[in-house]
Image (tube, grey):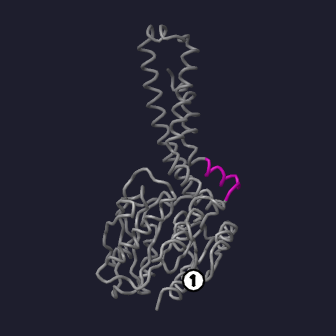
Amino acid sequence: MTVKDMLKLTWLPIVAASLCCLSPLILVLFGLSSVSFAASLSGTLYGGYRWVFRLAGLLLLGGSLWMYFRRKGICTIADARKHRTEVMNAILLVLVAGVVGYVVFLYGVVEYGGIAAGIWGAPRSAHELQPEATARGAQEVAFSAPDGYQLKGTLWTSTDPSSPAIILVHQYGSNRHDFDSFAPDLLNDGYTVLAYDIRGFGESQNGPASINDFPKDTAGAVQFLESQKTPPSHIGIIGASVGANVAFVASGSIPGIFAAVSLSPSNTGPRGVLMGSDISGFNPHSILIASDEREKSDADFIFNLAHDPKEEKTYPGFGHGVLLLRSAQARSDILAFLRAHLNP
């Protein structure tokens, strides 16, 4: 079997297996969806259905091998037994090439293409704190979500432990260090800050979970803060991309959340994921919705679902999710909003 043969046999199965993340990237590149919708779609497809896509790729790979053997005149079990060595070598080579190609394509080409397009945050090492954040006495902590998932986080405690606290929820495909550069701003305003890894990301527990379960992690973070020796007076939340939708849902469903900031939320439809439509008595409020101009339609939709008090801000040209924090005006607006809704 030649290298050309292996490429012919594996390219389509590799693409099919990668469609959970490739299709949202294609939608963005061709201008068919917003970055926030693509981020939410990839979260849904990869988080809940990646094994379906992998199985589809494996079936296509099997079909490609079957056609290859037929072209070689190996059409029956008797033929396969006669050419056993050739058949086994071909299967082994194609399987190895397929797995390697899948890993390189999905976690190399597609992932970094998505990062360049702003769909996913660039994942940092779980221990790669920004220098200014490290200097402020970060503590590594662990706590549980109500359904038992074990979560890891970073806690910065205010000099006044009874002051309000802020929970930070990262983008899909990233980890809790998305907000390291913004944590000092919050600390300077006197807040205790807790950033955690969503289940399945960073150092938090992996396992079968729906994207709609992500707010359970926030509920665990609230319980963790309220269990401290000196609980915070009020708790707010800031989320980016998928974390923005988590913040939106938390504002209307978790009693301990008094204010929320949602950076680039996604409109996944009236009954879509992380829209709160499946929650009895859902009442999102006290929320700031922020986006750049390309994602304003999604932001408008989420804003219209929220109840007063609420605010909406647009920062043209700054990008998706945590990239909005490059705007000095955005940082200032967020801090002003939190002061108005959390400080006694």
Q: Is residue 264 above or below residue 137?
A: above
- Taking the spot 42% from the left edge, 58% from the top edge, the residue there is 199
Residue 259 or 155: which is nearer the viewer? 259
- Is the residue marked by circle 1 packed among few (<14), some (14-19), or many (20+) residues within 10 Å? some
Q: Give the prevailing secondary structure in the magenta stretch.
A: helix
| Residue picked out by circle 1 | 333
Q: Is residue 91 above or below residue 283?
A: above
Residue sitting at the far bottom:
344
Query: Where residue 234 appears, x then y in whole percent?
Result: 44, 83
Does residue 29 belong to the magenta stretch? yes
Tag 1: residue type? Asp
Image position of 84 (left or right of 116)? left
Residue 175 or 227: which is nearer the viewer? 227
Query: Where residue 138 appears, x then y in whole percent?
Result: 33, 74
Highlighted range, magenta: 23-33
Instruction: Locate residue 194: give its quadrant.
Output: bottom left
